[in-house]
Image (tube, rainbow, N blue to C red):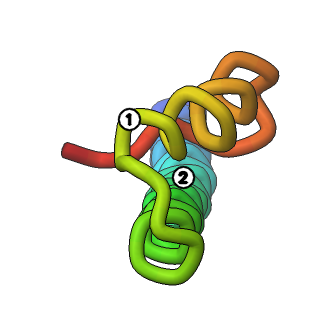
Amino acid sequence: MRERSRLGSAILTLLLAGAVLGGAACSTTRRDLRIGTGFISYMLCAGVFVSRLSPEQVRADSITPLLRKGIVPPPVV
């Protein structure tokens, strides 16, 4: 009976640790995606409204190279 209690405690501890680590990973991923999306929208607005370029040109010249290199995560749609 005592071994069963230890096994249950070990399983519960592992599940709890997995939940905490999984939650931390999801939180970081969502924040990174929001930052990437905000950066891309900033670049697009600056290119279109400030520099008077077409959206297609800004995307081709500024945004797509960053997405290909993996510097900025893809935007959330």
Q: Amino acid at mark 1?
A: Glu
Q: Residue at x 47, y 44 (%)?
A: 15
Closer-to-camera residue (3/20): 20
Mark 1: secondary structure: helix
Residue 63 drawn at (x, y percent): 60, 40
As shown in the figure, which amino acid type bears the numbered disc 2?
Thr
Element type at marker 2? helix
Residue 27 percent across, percent down from the top left: 50, 65
Q: What is the residue that sits farthest to the top in this orientation?
A: 68
The answer to whether one can see residue 18 in this image is yes
Frontmost residue, 20 versus 58: 58
Sort mark 1 into few (<14), some (14-19) or many (20+) by Cα contacts within 10 Å. few
Number of numbered discs on residues: 2
**Residue marked by disc 1:** 56
Q: Residues within 10 Å of mark 2 (few under 14, many from 20)?
A: few
Q: Residue 2, image x and y in percent?
A: 55, 42
Report, in whole angstroms, how far the alpha carbon at label 2 lies from the one at label 1.
28 Å
The residue sitting at the left extreme is 77
- Mark seen at residue 29: 2
User: Which mark lies nearer to you, 2 or 1?
Assistant: 1
Residue under the image location 59 percent in, 52 percent down: 25
Relative vertical location of residue 43 with respect to residue 42 in this rendering, above or below: above
